[in-house]
Image (spheres, grey):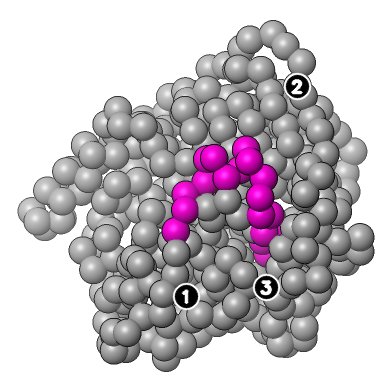
C-alpha cells in the first residue's frame, strides 16, 4: 500500500471512530445478494421503491431538510476506472454471506446469512480496527437494518414464505441491550431514538419502543396521514425533510413504483420500461435505479425531487457507467452507484445544493452487494463469480472528488 493511501485511510479511520454523534440513517439499507438472485429468478421486474409522507410531525422533526435547484454547471467528464488499494477491515466467519451493512458512531453493523449455525446474525465491528465487538443470533432472515438517532440500531426480521418468528428489534450501539415488537416487516424508518415508522400493507404504522434493556410495552398506532394505496404493498421507505418516501409493488413483485403517502394518486414509475429498483434519499431528493422488464437487474440512474418530478443532471444521463446501475446508496452528500461495467466498479460523486460534483470511479474485485460509509471511508462487500457469496468487507478511502 502506498504511503499516501495508508495515511489517508488511517486519518479517516480515526475520524470515523470518534465520539461525535452520527447522522441518522448514514447508510441506506442494502439488498442482500441472496434476495437479489432470488428476485432475478422469480420475477422479470425489479421490486423496490420509496413512499413519500408529508406533514407527519414526528417524521418532520427528525429528518434532514433540503432543497433542489437544477445544476448550471457544464457536464463533467467521467474519469476512467482506477484500481483502489483497499484494507481488509473485516473477515467474516466461514460460510457467512453479507446481507446488509450500516455505519454509525464507532461501529460497522453487518447482517449475515450463514450456511452453518446460527443461520442469521447481526454483528457490530469497530470501524477503526475491524475487531468484532458482539454478534447476536437473529431468529429469522433479516429484512431491514437501519441506524437512527442516539446510537440506536433497528433490525427487522421475518420468515417470509417459511414458518418461523418475525419481529422488530431496537438495540443499543454495541448490541448489548435490546427491546422488541412482535411484528416483522420489509423495512423500518427511524424517526427518533425510540420511534420509527413501519410499512404495513397499505399504509404506515408509528411505533414507539421502550429503551433497549428496559421493561415496557411497545406502542403501535396507524398513521392517519400514511395511506399509500389499497392495491399495492409497501416494500421500502426513504425520507427527506418532513417528507417520507415509499416503494410499492403488487403481490407478485411487479409494477414497482413510488407513491406519495396521503396522496396515492401521485406516483412515479411502474411501467414495463420504468420499474423502480433501488432508492436512496439524499440532499433534498431521491436517487434511484430505473430498469425495464427486459433487463430487470440493470438500469439508469435517475434523480427525483420530493414531488416525484425527474430532475436528473445532464452529466448523470450522459455517463455510460451510470446508465448501467445495479444499486445506489448515499452517505451525507455523496452518492454511490454499483455499475455493471465490463469490470464491476463503484461510481461516486458529490451532490450539494443541486450541483453535481466530479464523477469518480473505484474498480472493485467483484460485484458490490453491500455498502456503508463513515467519514472519509467507504466499506464495501463484494461477491466474485456467479455464487454472489461474500467473504470479507474492505475499506476504501473516499475519493476527494466525491467528498
- The residue to which callout 2 is attached is 218
Which numbered marker is on residue 139? Answer: none
Residues packed near mark 3 inside 10 Å, few (<14), some (14 to 19) or many (20 plus): many
Instruction: Give the x, y percent position of residue 26.
Output: 45, 46
Tell me the magenta residue range: 49-66
346 is higher (above) or lower (below) than 180: below
Residue at coordinates 38% horizontally, 72% vertically from top-left? Answer: 354
Residue 339, label in figure: 1
Looking at the image, residue 262 sits to the left or right of residue 342; the answer is right
Whichever of callouts 3 and 2 sits on the residue coming sooner in the sequence is 2
Q: CA distance from mark 1 to mark 2?
A: 41 Å
- Secondary structure state at the residue bearing disc 2: loop
CA–CA distance in space, label 3 to label 2: 33 Å
Callout 3: SS: strand
Is residue 59 within the magenta segment?
yes
Residue 327 image point, x, y percent:
54, 67
Amino acid at each position: 500500500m502506498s504511503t499516501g493511501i495508508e495515511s489517508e485511510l488511517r486519518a479517516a479511520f480515526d475520524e470515523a471512530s470518534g465520539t461525535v454523534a452520527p447522522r441518522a440513517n448514514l447508510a441506506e439499507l442494502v439488498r442482500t445478494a441472496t434476495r437479489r438472485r432470488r428476485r432475478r429468478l422469480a420475477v422479470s421486474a425489479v421490486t423496490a421503491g420509496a413512499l413519500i409522507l408529508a406533514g407527519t410531525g414526528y417524521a418532520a422533526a427528525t429528518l434532514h431538510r433540503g432543497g433542489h435547484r437544477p445544476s448550471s454547471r457544464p457536464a463533467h467528464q467521467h474519469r476512467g476506472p482506477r484500481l483502489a488499494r483497499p484494507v481488509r477491515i473485516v473477515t467474516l466467519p466461514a460460510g457467512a454471506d453479507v446481507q446488509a451493512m450500516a455505519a454509525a458512531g464507532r461501529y460497522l453493523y453487518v447482517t449475515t446469512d450463514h450456511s452453518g449455525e446460527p443461520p442469521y446474525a447481526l454483528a457490530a465491528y469497530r470501524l477503526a480496527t475491524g475487531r468484532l465487538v458482539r454478534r447476536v443470533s437473529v431468529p429469522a432472515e433479516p429484512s431491514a437494518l437501519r441506524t437512527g438517532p442516539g446510537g440506536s440500531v433497528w433490525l427487522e426480521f421475518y420468515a417470509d414464505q417459511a414458518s418461523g418468528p418475525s419481529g422488530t428489534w431496537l438495540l443499543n450501539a454495541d448490541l448489548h441491550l435490546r427491546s422488541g415488537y412482535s411484528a416483522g416487516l420489509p423495512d423500518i424508518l427511524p424517526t427518533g431514538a425510540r420511534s420509527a415508522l413501519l410499512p404495513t400493507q397499505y399504509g404506515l404504522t408509528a411505533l414507539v419502543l421502550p429503551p433497549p434493556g428496559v421493561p415496557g410495552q411497545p406502542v403501535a398506532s396507524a398513521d392517519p396521514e400514511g395511506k399509500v394505496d389499497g392495491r399495492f404493498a409497501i416494500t421500502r421507505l426513504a425520507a427527506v425533510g418532513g417528507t417520507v418516501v415509499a416503494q410499492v409493488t403488487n403481490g407478485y413483485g411487479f409494477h414497482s413504483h413510488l407513491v406519495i403517502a396521503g396522496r396515492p394518486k401521485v406516483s412515479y414509475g411502474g411501467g414495463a420500461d420504468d420499474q423502480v429498483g433501488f432508492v436512496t434519499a439524499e440532499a433534498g431528493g431521491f436517487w434511484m435505479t430505473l430498469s425495464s422488464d427486459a433487463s430487470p437487474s440493470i438500469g439508469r440512474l435517475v434523480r427525483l425531487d420530493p414531488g416525484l418530478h425527474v430532475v436528473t443532471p445532464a452529466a448523470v444521463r450522459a455517463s455510460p457507467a451510470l446508465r448501467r446501475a445495479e444499486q445506489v446508496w448515499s452517505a451525507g452528500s455523496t452518492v454511490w452507484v454499483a455499475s455493471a461495467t465490463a469490470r464491476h466498479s463503484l461510481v461516486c460523486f458529490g451532490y450539494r445544493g443541486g450541483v453535481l460534483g466530479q464523477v469518480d470511479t473505484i474498480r472493485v474485485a467483484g460485484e458490490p452487494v453491500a455498502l456503508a460509509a463513515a467519514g472519509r471511508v467507504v466499506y464495501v462487500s463484494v461477491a466474485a463469480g456467479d455464487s454472489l457469496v461474500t467473504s470479507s468487507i474492505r475499506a476504501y478511502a473516499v475519493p476527494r472528488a466525491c467528498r
